[in-house]
Amino acid sequence: MATVTAPAEGRTSSAGAHLSRKKRLFFPFFLPAVTLYVLFLLVPTVATVVLGFTSWSGAGDTPRFTGLDNYGELIASDAFRYSFLNTVLYIVAGGVGTFLLAFLFTMVLREMRGGKVVRAVLFFPNIVAPVALGMFFGIILVYRPNRQGLANYLLESVGIDAVKFLAPENITWVVTGCLIWASSGFYITILMAAVDRIPPYLYEDSDIAGATPWQKFRHVTLPLTWDVVGVAGVLWTISAIKIFELVFVLAGPGTYSPPIRSWTLGVYVFDRSFGDQGAPQYGMACAAAVVMILLVSVLVVLLRRLMRRDTIQY
Amino acid sequence: MKDYPDLLTDVCHLAKLRNITQLDRVVAMRSTRLTALAAASVLVLTACGGGGSDSGSGGGEAQLTLPGVDEYLNAPCPEVGTKPATDKEFTYWSMWTADEPQGKVLGKAIRCFTEKTGVQVNVQWLGRKLLTQNVAPALNTDTVPDLFDQDVSQVKAAIVAPGGTQTVEDVLDYKVGEGDKRVRDVIPATSWDFPANKDADGKIFEIPYELIGNAWWYNKDLVKDFQAPKTVDELFGLFDKAKADGLAAVSQDGDIDFYNAYFYTQIAERYVGAGGLEKVALDKSGQAWLSDPNLAKAAEPVEKLAKGQYLVDGWDAAKFPQVQQRWADGESAYLFLGSWAPSETREYLSKQGGDKGIAYATFQFPQPDGAEHKVVEQLPLGFAVTKKAKHPEAAKAFIAYTLNKDILSGIPAVADNLTPRADLAVPDSLKDIKAVLESDAEHTIFMDGLDALSGGKWVESVFYPLNNDLLKGKLTAKQFVEGLAAKQAEFWKTNN
């Protein structure tokens, strides 16, 4: 017996030693991460919220507490109104467009020969910096009679009148389009990874039952990727709320802030912090940043609610 | 195959075509990428040798009787007029980079100043964004520069408004190193004595060393039998003639708000005088826009410009600088732009290859009917001294020294730009602008300084959106001023 218990005891004590070693290691591992997190994320976030209630023009200037004045000014400001509405538009319209396109590709790509290559190609725009994309689209979409940009050249060559894509009244929709083009590859990649997990026999079964591609999507693909779609939706919301560079270079000359009608919250915050003229208004920028945090929180919570559902096991 | 001297000549011509000033669109500050080009051009020009070989081959840039770059940079240093008594050093944060033309000129000024006085200059070449990125953040620390530079408008908005400068009024009486000549003797009052250059105490905060102007530009080779317009009707007559000749009348890069604003402000200033628009803009009720009927009248030519289809098709659906390039390509006859127009368009044309140049010529806005103020817009670039400067005396002595004829001549010679001094050579394409800047017209800064109001927020929220609509033909002149009145009242409720 002794021989049996001894190892058992030994095991227990070694497990105990392991546990206490683990405990001893807990703080050395935990503290640096938490310290960094608190220092570089939590503190700045709290500082942003606090500074949102002040008037402050940066380094050394003493922030002056102004209560809700900044928020009052935000609401009264045309620039902010346009920024807010445009941002919501980009999130919603851009999101719907991106996901429609992504779903469409999941329907097609799964069965397509060379789908892997196509997938890789579709991902390419995602590698390019949005600033470069903005400049690129600026050249593609230019309207110049007799020497059109590529887009209008193609339109004219099939007998359609050239369109003033970059005119202020169209720019928001053009940016939405570019956004969808640029980001759908990323979401196609995520969704396709989920689709690849679905057992092929489910599709084979549907084929035998004579299901159309739409039916396969509706009854197999979508239910079985639902949780991934939800996560992708959250990812989209978080990235879309930060939209900045594409708008900055596509809607304006690229060196100055574009006209306020095309602004997003990101542009607003940038302009108030590092705009071309005048002393920085970090208080206002912080207030707008707080609105961004609130907006993204609300949208993400809503989205999670909307997408909530029991996970399907398969 | 070409032999070496020929080849060198070609390179030299090309260099002059591009000429070396590319970077002077200072308001615009877009051009860091051009720095390398400019530097390269300077190097090439150096190889071309100095001594008045500036026979521009760009078509139109005629003989400039300027010293060569080499000659300027190697010339002996002039004497310092007013020497600092105690300071042994000072710090200068520059809006230029060391290797661009103005940087070279100021670099020489620094070398010479140290040589003649023994004062060490700690210079940092920071580039155009220095005010918001460097100077403003440093203001409340103890590491401020003693001296910095930028255009008056930006310095006022970013540094003077929060109280970061001290007056440089005393520099006006510093000697520049030419006998008894003081600063106020060599630069005209119009270049420094105006409201936009005054701080809260009404004292001037900047001494200019370079002037930027603006004008209507046209190509003499393209627009024949040109007669400068004396009335707005004659101006539209020119436009109609251009259209009849199969050209578009006016090129305008519509995605830059402040370019779009030039038309209205240029005309309105002539009705209300220098500083008049700023007063109207500061009216809290906004009613000032309606109480003076001339303000609506000034918008009528702009409305006509829009509704008469005078702007080149597509002006509002392109990205800067595509539309001004269409002017350079000869698609349109006229272009309203600052004195940086030649350097920008020349650079574009040289990149296109070929030897097509432009015979640059300019004229000013004509006097509108019933307008009583002769007004000229300028944008002085100059030096300012920080409030917390540790060595203001040396910094101020350096300002005065920079205005010495033998130092300042580098601005036209090396940088192909205008200075406030009347006795320096003037680049050919800028002669008309220089003449009007030296006339007795009322001087105001670009856009009457509207873009500096409320740190730029006034134009951004009130003026630009409505002005863009006016220029797009969406508003009548009357609706435009009514809109301004309403928006402005709303704006001043929440801003100050």
Image (cartoon, rainbow, N blue to C red):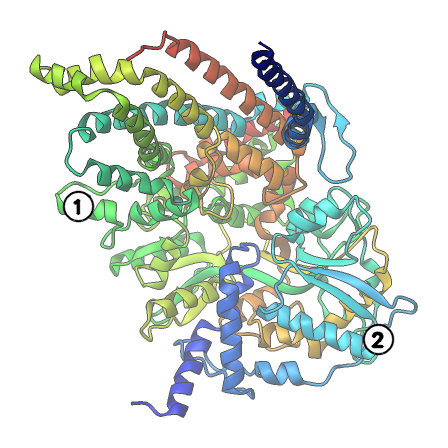
Does B140 sit above or below residue B41?
above
Residue B372 point in image, percent of width and height: 58, 51
Residue at 15% x, 29% y: name it: A111
Q: Nearer the viewer, residue A293 or B420?
A: A293
**Quarter location, residue A93:** top left
Q: Nearer the viewer, residue B148 or B496?
A: B148
Name the subunit of mark 2: B
Looking at the rendered structure, which numbered label has been put on residue A156?
Answer: 1
Does B253 sit above or below residue A10?
below
Q: How many marks?
A: 2
| Pair 1/2: label in front | 2
- Give amino acid for label 1: Glu
Query: Which residue bears the numbered disc 2?
Result: B118
Image-based side of B141 in relation to A219, left or right:
right
Residue at 77% x, 56% y: name it: B145
Looking at the rendered structure, which numbered label has been put on residue A311?
Answer: none
Q: Secondary structure at mark 1?
A: helix
Residue B185 point in image, percent of width and height: 77, 71
Mark 2 neighbour class, 10 Å CA radius: few under 14, some 14 to 19, many 20 or more = some
Name the subunit of mark 1: A
